Image (cartoon, grey):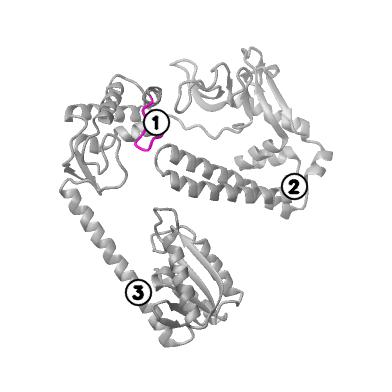
């Protein structure tokens, strides 16, 4: 029979995929012994097939497509659990076998499951049920083991915690001293960001050798393990490892952190900033950031674009020499765009059939969402939430997805961005999509430069001087 080999490895800590290669070699040997013609080989490395995994399996999806094409009569695996650990997926394959040439699943230990007979289907279902049961038993044993270790005050293992040696049971005195200095600075009134600056200026890195960010400092100083407490599923137990902070210091630190968190709890959240990524400082050339600011303690918060003086990990970033009212700047840029472009001739150039228009809007929203996903991946890596190997696996896939979206946008040539029968102003004012407005601006504007200076004249209800704004148009 024409056979496809499928191999899968749940965890590949070495990154060498040796186990997958062994599975393929074993399956090829089995195929040769039984006279099967190997027409395809598909594999997934470092991907689980359990019900807890939501990651796609590209190799398995390719196998599915090969079966649908009618080129595969048998699937060869080293054991049934390499293919499935979920009964619902097996049932999908059984239904697929009813309308394709697929006849059987065969394992290299000589067990075959004929998918065109009742006995074969029953045996395949039983194999998966047994695998699910065994997986659950292993999971239950692991949970009981972790709960027992927690009650005994032992570490759960895993990544080395800053301040402790490998195994997390012995103090690393040098790092523990850094933690105590961080705690002293927190109690002295320093912010998380100022503590991160200090750590990076001193050359201190996290346990993974990364720079400190404010969120890393906050999450680190809130870990109860530093108070000698073992936490497990909401319960706390005395730890067997030595504490970094004494009880009084820890309570004072917790009080400071809670107080600071509550201080901004009722602070109004600013809406998204329309010009982020397009607007730059006319003094130092750095991108401007959006933030809410207060002119005086008794004045309300207002939205602004400003040249950020401090960075995430180092103090020096921009010059801090430019601040503009965000509402005024966004309103003026909107009017400049509409005044420049809102003509019947331009509307005819930009307008195309409604189906392509809808397609473009969907692609623009997907592009914005994919860019946000990439930023979230980078933020998670910077904060120590994912490892470098995980970054190396996730980031290229996310960037490839973004590149695919960009190609689809380019394939539309000059896209229609206006609904048929409506002007640009009508479309802008009625649109509920900030991402659509932002993407439209990006298609039309290359760069907005905000020059330093005091906005003395009034424009509408704001103090705003258009002479201090320079717009570089793309068209």
Please, what is the dominant secondary structure of the magenta stretch? loop
- In this view, the mark in front (2 or 3): 3
Q: Earlier in the sequence, mark 2 or mark 1?
A: 1
Question: Considering only order in the chain, which callout, 3 or 2, is on the residue closer to the N terminus?
Answer: 3
In the rendered image, which quarter is residue 63 located in? bottom right
Instruction: Estimate the x, y position of residue 182 in percent, counting from the top left.
Output: 30, 25
Q: Secondary structure at mark 1?
A: loop
Residue range highlighted in magenta: 203-212
Q: Residues within 10 Å of mark 2 (few under 14, many from 20)?
A: some
User: Between disc 1 and disc 3, whose residue precedes?
Assistant: 3
Q: Which mark is residue 212?
A: 1
Q: Is residue 266 visible?
A: no
- Label 1 – label 3 distance at C-alpha: 47 Å
Q: Mark 2 highlights which residue? A: 415
Q: Is residue 385 left or right of residue 286?
A: left
Report which residue position mark 3 lands on: 129
Please identify the quarter of the rendering in which residue 51 is found.
bottom left
Is residue 205 rendered magenta in the image?
yes
């Amino acid at each position: 029979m024409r056979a496809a080999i499928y191999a899968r490895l749940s965890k590949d800590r070495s990154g060498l995929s040796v186990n997958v290669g062994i599975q393929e070699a074993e399956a090829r040997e089995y195929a040769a012994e039984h006279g099967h013609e190997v027409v395809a080989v598909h594999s997934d490395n470092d991907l689980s097939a359990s019900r807890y995994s939501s990651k796609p399996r590209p190799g398995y999806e390719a196998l599915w497509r090969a079966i649908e094409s009618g080129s595969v009569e048998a699937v060869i695996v080293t054991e049934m659990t390499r293919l499935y650990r979920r009964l619902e997926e097996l049932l999908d394959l059984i239904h697929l076998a009813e309308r394709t040439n697929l006849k059987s699943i065969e394992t290299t230990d000589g067990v075959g499951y004929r998918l065109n007979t009742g006995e074969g289907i029953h045996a395949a279902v039983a194999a998966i049920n047994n695998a699910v049961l065994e997986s659950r038993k292993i999971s239950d044993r692991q949970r009981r083991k972790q709960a027992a270790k927690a009650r005994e005050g032992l570490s759960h293992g895993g990544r080395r915690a800053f301040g402790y040696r490998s195994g997390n049971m012995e103090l690393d005195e040098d790092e523990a001293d850094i933690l105590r200095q961080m705690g002293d600075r927190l109690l002295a009134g320093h912010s998380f960001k100022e503590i991160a600056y200090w750590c990076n200026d001193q050359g201190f890195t996290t346990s993974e050798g990364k720079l400190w960010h404010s969120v890393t400092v906050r999450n680190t100083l809130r870990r109860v393990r530093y108070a000698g407490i073992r936490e497990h599923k909401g319960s706390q137990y005395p730890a067997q490892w030595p504490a970094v902070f004494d009880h009084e210091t820890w309570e004072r630190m917790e009080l400071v952190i809670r107080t600071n968190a509550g201080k901004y709890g009722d602070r109004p959240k600013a809406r998204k900033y329309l010009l982020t990524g397009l607007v730059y400082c006319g003094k130092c050339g750095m991108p401007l950031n959006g933030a809410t600011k207060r002119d005086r303690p008794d004045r309300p918060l207002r939205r602004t674009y400003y040249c950020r003086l401090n960075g995430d990990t180092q103090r020096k970033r921009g010059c801090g020499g430019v601040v503009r009212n965000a509402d005024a700047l966004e309103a003026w840029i909107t009017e400049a765009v509409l005044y420049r472009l809102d003509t019947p001739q331009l509307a005819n150039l930009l307008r195309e059939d409604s189906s392509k228009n809808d397609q473009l809007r969907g692609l623009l929203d997907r592009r914005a969402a994919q860019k946000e996903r990439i930023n979230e991946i980078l933020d998670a890596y910077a904060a120590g939430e994912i490892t470098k190997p995980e970054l190396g696996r996730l980031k290229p896939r996310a960037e490839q997805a973004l590149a695919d979206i960009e190609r689809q946008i380019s394939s539309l040539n000059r896209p229609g961005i206006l609904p048929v029968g409506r002007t640009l102003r009508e479309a802008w004012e009625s649109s509920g999509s900030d991402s659509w407005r932002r993407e439209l601006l990006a298609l039309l504007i290359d760069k907005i430069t905000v020059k330093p200076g005091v906005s003395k004249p009034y424009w509408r209800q704001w103090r705003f001087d258009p002479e201090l704004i320079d717009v570089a148009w793309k068209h």
